[in-house]
Image: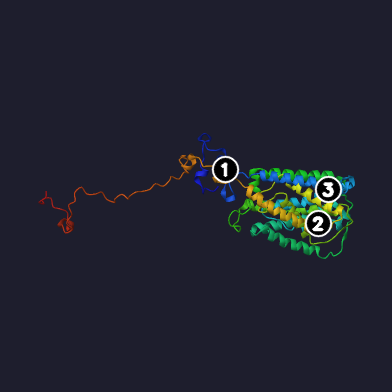
Amino acid sequence: MGYDDPGRHAPVEPSSGVPAAVLENVFDDPAHGEPGRDRLAVHVVWEVVLAAGLAVLIWLLWQADPAVLGDPGLRVLLVDVVALGLLALAAGLSLRTAAVNLAIGPVMVAAALHCAEQGDRGVALALGQAAAVAAVGGLALGLAVTVLHVPGWAASLAGAAGVVVYIGPRSEPVLVQSGYDPRGSTFYLFAGFAAVAVLGGLFGAIRPVRRLVGRFRPVADPARRRGAVAATVATLACVVSTVLAALAGILVATNGRDTVGPGDGLDWTVLAVGTALLAGTSAYGRRGGIFGTLLAVSLVGVVFAWAHVEGWAVSRWAVGGAALGVGLLVTRLVEAYGRPRPAGADPEPPALADSTLGSGWSVPRPTKLDDWPPALPVRPDDTPTDPWDASRWETRPPRWDGGDR
Protein backbone atom coordinates (compact mmCIF):
# COMPACT_ATOMS: atom_id res chain seq x y z
CA MET A 1 0.00 0.00 0.00
CA GLY A 2 1.09 3.58 -0.55
CA TYR A 3 1.73 5.64 2.56
CA ASP A 4 1.76 8.97 0.83
CA ASP A 5 -1.09 10.27 3.01
CA PRO A 6 -0.41 9.10 6.57
CA GLY A 7 -3.45 10.77 8.03
CA ARG A 8 -5.79 8.90 5.67
CA HIS A 9 -4.15 5.51 6.19
CA ALA A 10 -3.99 5.73 9.97
CA PRO A 11 -6.18 3.13 11.68
CA VAL A 12 -9.00 4.65 13.64
CA GLU A 13 -11.55 3.30 16.02
CA PRO A 14 -15.22 3.24 14.95
CA SER A 15 -16.05 5.17 18.11
CA SER A 16 -13.87 8.13 17.13
CA GLY A 17 -16.58 9.75 15.05
CA VAL A 18 -14.87 9.10 11.68
CA PRO A 19 -17.39 8.66 8.82
CA ALA A 20 -17.83 5.13 7.49
CA ALA A 21 -16.77 6.21 3.98
CA VAL A 22 -13.36 7.23 5.32
CA LEU A 23 -12.90 3.95 7.17
CA GLU A 24 -13.92 2.01 4.05
CA ASN A 25 -11.21 3.69 1.96
CA VAL A 26 -8.37 3.30 4.47
CA PHE A 27 -6.65 0.50 2.56
CA ASP A 28 -7.14 1.87 -0.97
CA ASP A 29 -3.85 2.33 -2.78
CA PRO A 30 -3.78 5.63 -4.70
CA ALA A 31 -1.24 4.07 -7.09
CA HIS A 32 -4.07 2.00 -8.60
CA GLY A 33 -6.71 4.68 -9.07
CA GLU A 34 -8.86 7.05 -7.10
CA PRO A 35 -9.67 5.77 -3.60
CA GLY A 36 -13.36 5.12 -3.06
CA ARG A 37 -16.26 3.31 -4.65
CA ASP A 38 -17.24 4.06 -8.25
CA ARG A 39 -20.70 5.55 -8.62
CA LEU A 40 -23.16 3.47 -10.67
CA ALA A 41 -26.06 5.94 -10.97
CA VAL A 42 -24.82 7.16 -14.37
CA HIS A 43 -24.88 3.57 -15.67
CA VAL A 44 -28.41 3.03 -14.38
CA VAL A 45 -29.66 6.19 -16.10
CA TRP A 46 -27.96 5.32 -19.39
CA GLU A 47 -29.28 1.75 -19.33
CA VAL A 48 -32.81 3.09 -18.87
CA VAL A 49 -32.25 5.19 -22.01
CA LEU A 50 -31.00 2.11 -23.89
CA ALA A 51 -34.01 0.08 -22.77
CA ALA A 52 -36.38 2.81 -23.96
CA GLY A 53 -34.63 3.00 -27.34
CA LEU A 54 -34.75 -0.78 -27.72
CA ALA A 55 -38.48 -0.82 -26.98
CA VAL A 56 -39.11 1.86 -29.64
CA LEU A 57 -37.07 -0.02 -32.26
CA ILE A 58 -38.84 -3.31 -31.54
CA TRP A 59 -42.17 -1.55 -32.01
CA LEU A 60 -40.98 -0.04 -35.30
CA LEU A 61 -39.76 -3.45 -36.49
CA TRP A 62 -43.07 -5.03 -35.58
CA GLN A 63 -44.92 -2.31 -37.45
CA ALA A 64 -42.75 -2.82 -40.54
CA ASP A 65 -42.95 -6.64 -40.64
CA PRO A 66 -44.47 -8.68 -37.79
CA ALA A 67 -43.13 -11.90 -39.36
CA VAL A 68 -39.57 -10.97 -38.36
CA LEU A 69 -40.57 -11.41 -34.72
CA GLY A 70 -42.27 -14.73 -35.49
CA ASP A 71 -40.80 -18.19 -35.09
CA PRO A 72 -38.52 -18.53 -38.13
CA GLY A 73 -37.36 -14.93 -38.32
CA LEU A 74 -36.90 -14.49 -34.59
CA ARG A 75 -34.52 -17.45 -34.39
CA VAL A 76 -32.28 -16.01 -37.10
CA LEU A 77 -32.37 -12.59 -35.44
CA LEU A 78 -31.45 -13.96 -32.02
CA VAL A 79 -28.54 -16.02 -33.37
CA ASP A 80 -27.20 -12.90 -35.09
CA VAL A 81 -27.61 -11.01 -31.81
CA VAL A 82 -25.70 -13.73 -29.93
CA ALA A 83 -22.87 -13.65 -32.50
CA LEU A 84 -22.60 -9.88 -32.22
CA GLY A 85 -22.96 -10.22 -28.45
CA LEU A 86 -19.94 -12.52 -28.19
CA LEU A 87 -17.93 -10.05 -30.23
CA ALA A 88 -19.13 -7.16 -28.05
CA LEU A 89 -18.26 -9.12 -24.91
CA ALA A 90 -14.76 -9.62 -26.33
CA ALA A 91 -14.43 -5.91 -27.01
CA GLY A 92 -15.91 -4.92 -23.65
CA LEU A 93 -13.65 -7.26 -21.69
CA SER A 94 -10.52 -5.98 -23.39
CA LEU A 95 -11.70 -2.40 -22.94
CA ARG A 96 -12.32 -2.81 -19.23
CA THR A 97 -8.83 -4.20 -18.74
CA ALA A 98 -7.40 -1.17 -20.62
CA ALA A 99 -5.90 -3.43 -23.32
CA VAL A 100 -8.37 -3.13 -26.19
CA ASN A 101 -8.17 -5.97 -28.71
CA LEU A 102 -8.70 -4.65 -32.25
CA ALA A 103 -7.99 -8.05 -33.81
CA ILE A 104 -11.36 -9.54 -32.82
CA GLY A 105 -13.04 -8.70 -36.16
CA PRO A 106 -10.43 -10.37 -38.38
CA VAL A 107 -10.29 -13.33 -35.98
CA MET A 108 -14.06 -13.75 -36.27
CA VAL A 109 -13.91 -13.74 -40.09
CA ALA A 110 -10.99 -16.19 -40.11
CA ALA A 111 -12.87 -18.55 -37.78
CA ALA A 112 -15.99 -18.34 -39.95
CA LEU A 113 -13.98 -19.19 -43.07
CA HIS A 114 -12.25 -22.07 -41.29
CA CYS A 115 -15.59 -23.49 -40.16
CA ALA A 116 -17.00 -23.17 -43.68
CA GLU A 117 -14.02 -25.02 -45.16
CA GLN A 118 -13.59 -27.69 -42.50
CA GLY A 119 -17.18 -28.09 -41.37
CA ASP A 120 -17.63 -31.36 -43.28
CA ARG A 121 -15.22 -32.98 -40.80
CA GLY A 122 -17.49 -31.99 -37.92
CA VAL A 123 -18.31 -28.66 -36.36
CA ALA A 124 -16.83 -29.77 -33.02
CA LEU A 125 -13.43 -30.36 -34.62
CA ALA A 126 -13.55 -27.06 -36.50
CA LEU A 127 -14.62 -25.26 -33.34
CA GLY A 128 -11.84 -26.85 -31.29
CA GLN A 129 -9.18 -25.98 -33.85
CA ALA A 130 -10.37 -22.39 -34.18
CA ALA A 131 -10.56 -21.93 -30.40
CA ALA A 132 -7.08 -23.43 -29.86
CA VAL A 133 -5.47 -21.22 -32.49
CA ALA A 134 -7.32 -18.20 -31.10
CA ALA A 135 -6.11 -18.96 -27.56
CA VAL A 136 -2.49 -19.22 -28.71
CA GLY A 137 -2.81 -16.01 -30.71
CA GLY A 138 -4.45 -14.21 -27.75
CA LEU A 139 -1.66 -15.40 -25.46
CA ALA A 140 0.98 -14.07 -27.87
CA LEU A 141 -0.89 -10.77 -28.05
CA GLY A 142 -1.19 -10.54 -24.27
CA LEU A 143 2.50 -11.23 -23.75
CA ALA A 144 3.41 -8.59 -26.33
CA VAL A 145 1.21 -6.04 -24.56
CA THR A 146 2.39 -6.81 -21.03
CA VAL A 147 6.03 -7.82 -21.47
CA LEU A 148 6.84 -4.95 -23.81
CA HIS A 149 4.24 -2.79 -22.03
CA VAL A 150 2.88 -1.26 -25.21
CA PRO A 151 -0.69 -0.04 -25.90
CA GLY A 152 -3.13 -2.84 -26.61
CA TRP A 153 -4.60 -1.12 -29.64
CA ALA A 154 -1.18 -0.97 -31.35
CA ALA A 155 -0.21 -4.58 -30.61
CA SER A 156 -3.63 -5.94 -31.57
CA LEU A 157 -3.63 -3.91 -34.78
CA ALA A 158 -0.40 -5.66 -35.74
CA GLY A 159 -2.05 -8.97 -34.90
CA ALA A 160 -5.07 -8.02 -37.00
CA ALA A 161 -2.77 -7.38 -39.95
CA GLY A 162 -1.39 -10.90 -39.61
CA VAL A 163 -4.88 -12.41 -39.58
CA VAL A 164 -5.85 -10.38 -42.65
CA VAL A 165 -2.83 -11.85 -44.43
CA TYR A 166 -4.24 -15.32 -43.63
CA ILE A 167 -7.62 -14.32 -45.07
CA GLY A 168 -6.11 -12.64 -48.14
CA PRO A 169 -5.80 -15.63 -50.57
CA ARG A 170 -9.58 -16.17 -50.48
CA SER A 171 -11.08 -13.86 -53.06
CA GLU A 172 -14.37 -15.72 -53.57
CA PRO A 173 -17.10 -16.66 -51.07
CA VAL A 174 -16.50 -20.01 -49.39
CA LEU A 175 -19.27 -22.63 -49.44
CA VAL A 176 -20.39 -23.64 -45.95
CA GLN A 177 -19.93 -27.42 -45.60
CA SER A 178 -21.08 -27.73 -42.00
CA GLY A 179 -24.35 -29.42 -41.18
CA TYR A 180 -24.70 -27.70 -37.81
CA ASP A 181 -27.62 -25.30 -37.45
CA PRO A 182 -27.60 -23.13 -34.32
CA ARG A 183 -31.21 -22.07 -34.91
CA GLY A 184 -32.32 -25.28 -33.24
CA SER A 185 -30.98 -24.06 -29.90
CA THR A 186 -31.53 -20.35 -30.39
CA PHE A 187 -33.17 -19.59 -27.06
CA TYR A 188 -30.55 -21.52 -25.09
CA LEU A 189 -27.79 -19.61 -26.85
CA PHE A 190 -29.46 -16.28 -26.18
CA ALA A 191 -30.14 -17.14 -22.54
CA GLY A 192 -26.51 -18.17 -22.10
CA PHE A 193 -25.24 -14.96 -23.65
CA ALA A 194 -27.62 -12.86 -21.52
CA ALA A 195 -26.53 -14.66 -18.35
CA VAL A 196 -22.83 -14.16 -19.11
CA ALA A 197 -23.34 -10.48 -19.97
CA VAL A 198 -25.42 -9.66 -16.88
CA LEU A 199 -23.38 -11.74 -14.43
CA GLY A 200 -20.19 -10.25 -15.82
CA GLY A 201 -21.62 -6.78 -15.26
CA LEU A 202 -22.67 -7.67 -11.71
CA PHE A 203 -19.27 -9.06 -10.81
CA GLY A 204 -17.63 -6.06 -12.46
CA ALA A 205 -19.63 -3.78 -10.18
CA ILE A 206 -18.09 -5.35 -7.06
CA ARG A 207 -15.45 -2.96 -5.83
CA PRO A 208 -12.44 -5.35 -5.47
CA VAL A 209 -13.23 -7.05 -8.80
CA ARG A 210 -13.66 -3.70 -10.53
CA ARG A 211 -10.29 -2.47 -9.28
CA LEU A 212 -8.60 -5.77 -10.15
CA VAL A 213 -9.97 -5.88 -13.70
CA GLY A 214 -8.96 -2.27 -14.34
CA ARG A 215 -5.56 -2.54 -12.70
CA PHE A 216 -3.75 -2.24 -16.06
CA ARG A 217 -5.31 1.19 -16.59
CA PRO A 218 -2.60 3.86 -16.25
CA VAL A 219 -2.98 6.38 -13.45
CA ALA A 220 0.15 8.47 -14.06
CA ASP A 221 2.71 7.87 -16.80
CA PRO A 222 1.11 5.48 -19.37
CA ALA A 223 4.50 3.91 -20.09
CA ARG A 224 5.06 2.93 -16.46
CA ARG A 225 4.57 -0.78 -15.76
CA ARG A 226 1.56 -1.66 -13.62
CA GLY A 227 2.91 -4.80 -11.94
CA ALA A 228 2.59 -8.57 -12.33
CA VAL A 229 -1.07 -8.74 -11.27
CA ALA A 230 -2.12 -6.15 -13.83
CA ALA A 231 -0.08 -7.91 -16.54
CA THR A 232 -1.72 -11.25 -15.73
CA VAL A 233 -5.22 -9.81 -15.89
CA ALA A 234 -4.53 -8.06 -19.21
CA THR A 235 -3.03 -11.23 -20.72
CA LEU A 236 -6.04 -13.32 -19.69
CA ALA A 237 -8.34 -10.69 -21.19
CA CYS A 238 -6.51 -10.90 -24.52
CA VAL A 239 -6.83 -14.71 -24.54
CA VAL A 240 -10.53 -14.75 -23.60
CA SER A 241 -11.49 -11.96 -26.00
CA THR A 242 -9.76 -13.69 -28.92
CA VAL A 243 -11.50 -17.01 -28.14
CA LEU A 244 -14.89 -15.26 -27.89
CA ALA A 245 -14.28 -13.73 -31.31
CA ALA A 246 -13.59 -17.19 -32.76
CA LEU A 247 -16.84 -18.53 -31.24
CA ALA A 248 -18.73 -15.62 -32.79
CA GLY A 249 -17.28 -16.57 -36.19
CA ILE A 250 -18.61 -20.12 -35.86
CA LEU A 251 -22.13 -18.78 -35.26
CA VAL A 252 -21.88 -16.39 -38.19
CA ALA A 253 -20.84 -19.20 -40.54
CA THR A 254 -23.59 -21.62 -39.49
CA ASN A 255 -26.60 -19.31 -39.09
CA GLY A 256 -28.47 -20.45 -42.19
CA ARG A 257 -25.89 -19.12 -44.63
CA ASP A 258 -24.79 -20.97 -47.75
CA THR A 259 -21.53 -19.08 -48.19
CA VAL A 260 -19.15 -16.97 -46.11
CA GLY A 261 -17.61 -14.00 -47.89
CA PRO A 262 -13.99 -13.09 -47.25
CA GLY A 263 -13.10 -9.70 -45.84
CA ASP A 264 -10.62 -8.01 -43.57
CA GLY A 265 -13.10 -7.99 -40.66
CA LEU A 266 -12.17 -4.51 -39.46
CA ASP A 267 -15.77 -3.40 -39.94
CA TRP A 268 -16.72 -6.04 -37.36
CA THR A 269 -14.09 -4.62 -35.00
CA VAL A 270 -15.51 -1.11 -35.34
CA LEU A 271 -19.03 -2.43 -34.78
CA ALA A 272 -18.03 -4.47 -31.72
CA VAL A 273 -16.01 -1.70 -30.06
CA GLY A 274 -18.73 0.83 -30.83
CA THR A 275 -21.37 -1.45 -29.31
CA ALA A 276 -19.26 -1.97 -26.17
CA LEU A 277 -18.83 1.79 -25.75
CA LEU A 278 -22.53 2.30 -26.41
CA ALA A 279 -23.22 -0.18 -23.60
CA GLY A 280 -21.51 2.14 -21.13
CA THR A 281 -18.01 0.68 -21.02
CA SER A 282 -15.39 3.38 -20.59
CA ALA A 283 -12.82 3.74 -23.36
CA TYR A 284 -10.22 4.29 -20.63
CA GLY A 285 -10.92 0.96 -18.97
CA ARG A 286 -12.18 -0.27 -15.59
CA ARG A 287 -15.70 1.18 -15.63
CA GLY A 288 -18.84 -0.38 -17.13
CA GLY A 289 -22.49 -1.06 -16.44
CA ILE A 290 -24.55 -4.17 -15.65
CA PHE A 291 -27.26 -4.59 -18.30
CA GLY A 292 -25.64 -2.28 -20.85
CA THR A 293 -24.04 -4.95 -23.05
CA LEU A 294 -27.25 -6.97 -23.35
CA LEU A 295 -29.31 -3.87 -24.17
CA ALA A 296 -26.81 -2.33 -26.61
CA VAL A 297 -26.27 -5.58 -28.54
CA SER A 298 -30.01 -6.17 -28.81
CA LEU A 299 -30.53 -2.58 -29.97
CA VAL A 300 -27.89 -2.84 -32.70
CA GLY A 301 -29.25 -6.21 -33.85
CA VAL A 302 -32.77 -4.79 -34.13
CA VAL A 303 -31.40 -1.80 -36.07
CA PHE A 304 -29.95 -4.12 -38.71
CA ALA A 305 -33.16 -6.16 -38.88
CA TRP A 306 -35.30 -3.03 -39.21
CA ALA A 307 -33.05 -1.60 -41.92
CA HIS A 308 -33.22 -4.90 -43.83
CA VAL A 309 -37.01 -4.95 -43.66
CA GLU A 310 -37.23 -1.35 -44.84
CA GLY A 311 -34.87 -2.11 -47.73
CA TRP A 312 -32.12 0.23 -46.58
CA ALA A 313 -28.51 -0.60 -47.39
CA VAL A 314 -26.88 0.00 -44.02
CA SER A 315 -23.28 -1.11 -43.66
CA ARG A 316 -21.51 -2.23 -40.53
CA TRP A 317 -19.13 0.70 -40.97
CA ALA A 318 -22.01 3.19 -40.70
CA VAL A 319 -23.65 1.61 -37.67
CA GLY A 320 -20.30 0.99 -35.98
CA GLY A 321 -19.16 4.55 -36.58
CA ALA A 322 -22.41 5.96 -35.17
CA ALA A 323 -22.12 3.68 -32.15
CA LEU A 324 -18.53 4.81 -31.63
CA GLY A 325 -19.53 8.45 -31.75
CA VAL A 326 -22.31 8.04 -29.19
CA GLY A 327 -20.14 5.71 -27.13
CA LEU A 328 -17.39 8.31 -26.78
CA LEU A 329 -19.93 10.76 -25.39
CA VAL A 330 -21.08 8.05 -22.96
CA THR A 331 -17.45 7.50 -21.94
CA ARG A 332 -17.16 11.18 -21.04
CA LEU A 333 -20.30 10.91 -18.90
CA VAL A 334 -19.11 7.72 -17.24
CA GLU A 335 -15.71 9.17 -16.39
CA ALA A 336 -17.21 12.43 -15.13
CA TYR A 337 -20.05 11.02 -13.04
CA GLY A 338 -18.91 7.45 -12.39
CA ARG A 339 -15.63 8.06 -10.60
CA PRO A 340 -15.52 8.18 -6.79
CA ARG A 341 -16.56 11.40 -5.15
CA PRO A 342 -13.70 13.87 -4.66
CA ALA A 343 -12.00 13.78 -1.30
CA GLY A 344 -12.92 17.41 -0.67
CA ALA A 345 -16.65 16.73 -0.98
CA ASP A 346 -16.89 15.73 2.68
CA PRO A 347 -15.03 17.79 5.28
CA GLU A 348 -12.22 15.95 7.02
CA PRO A 349 -13.00 15.18 10.66
CA PRO A 350 -10.89 17.02 13.23
CA ALA A 351 -9.53 13.75 14.59
CA LEU A 352 -7.94 12.98 11.24
CA ALA A 353 -6.99 16.55 10.40
CA ASP A 354 -5.02 17.02 13.61
CA SER A 355 -3.28 13.68 13.16
CA THR A 356 -3.27 13.06 16.94
CA LEU A 357 -4.55 9.49 16.88
CA GLY A 358 -1.43 8.08 18.44
CA SER A 359 -1.04 5.33 15.86
CA GLY A 360 2.62 5.88 15.06
CA TRP A 361 1.88 7.08 11.50
CA SER A 362 0.84 10.64 12.49
CA VAL A 363 2.92 13.63 11.47
CA PRO A 364 2.77 16.54 13.97
CA ARG A 365 2.06 19.98 12.67
CA PRO A 366 5.16 22.23 12.48
CA THR A 367 5.26 25.04 15.03
CA LYS A 368 6.64 28.48 14.38
CA LEU A 369 9.89 29.35 16.13
CA ASP A 370 10.08 33.03 17.14
CA ASP A 371 13.81 33.06 17.89
CA TRP A 372 16.77 30.69 18.04
CA PRO A 373 18.06 30.03 21.58
CA PRO A 374 21.64 31.18 22.22
CA ALA A 375 24.36 28.61 21.76
CA LEU A 376 25.97 29.40 25.14
CA PRO A 377 24.47 30.77 28.34
CA VAL A 378 25.03 34.42 29.08
CA ARG A 379 27.75 35.10 31.69
CA PRO A 380 26.45 36.62 34.93
CA ASP A 381 29.12 39.32 34.86
CA ASP A 382 30.05 41.42 31.91
CA THR A 383 33.73 41.68 32.83
CA PRO A 384 35.74 41.10 29.64
CA THR A 385 38.48 38.52 29.69
CA ASP A 386 41.99 39.64 28.84
CA PRO A 387 43.12 37.57 25.83
CA TRP A 388 46.76 38.09 26.85
CA ASP A 389 46.31 36.74 30.34
CA ALA A 390 49.34 34.64 31.31
CA SER A 391 47.19 31.75 32.46
CA ARG A 392 45.98 31.25 28.91
CA TRP A 393 49.52 30.71 27.63
CA GLU A 394 50.79 28.55 30.49
CA THR A 395 51.27 24.93 29.39
CA ARG A 396 52.55 23.41 32.67
CA PRO A 397 50.19 22.55 35.52
CA PRO A 398 50.32 24.91 38.52
CA ARG A 399 52.74 24.04 41.32
CA TRP A 400 51.45 22.99 44.72
CA ASP A 401 53.24 25.78 46.37
CA GLY A 402 52.06 28.47 44.00
CA GLY A 403 51.08 31.79 45.26
CA ASP A 404 47.40 31.17 44.61
CA ARG A 405 47.24 28.23 46.92
Where does label 2 land, which residue?
111
Task: Kindly give the residue lying farthest to the top in the view shown.
Answer: 15
Amino acid on which the number 3 mark rests in the picture: Leu
* Label located before the other in sequence (2 or 1): 1
Label 1 secondary element: loop
Q: CA distance from mark 2 to mark 1?
A: 46 Å
Q: Residue at x 81, y 49 (%)?
A: 302
**Which of the 4 image quadrants contains residue 170?**
bottom right
What numbered label is drawn on residue 245?
none
Q: Which residue is mark 1?
A: 25
x, y percentage for residue 18? Answer: 53, 38
Left or right of residue 239: residue 344: left
Q: What x and y, as percent, mark residue 375?
A: 29, 51
Q: Residues within 10 Å of mark 1 (few under 14, many from 20)?
A: some
Measured as percent of width and height from the top left, residue 197 is found at 74, 46
Report the mark closest to the observer, 1 or 3: 3
What residue would you read off at disc 3?
A: 60
For label 3, the SS is helix
Q: Position of residue 56 (x, y in %)?
A: 80, 46
The residues bearing labels 3 and 2 have C-alpha atoms spaced at a distance of: 34 Å
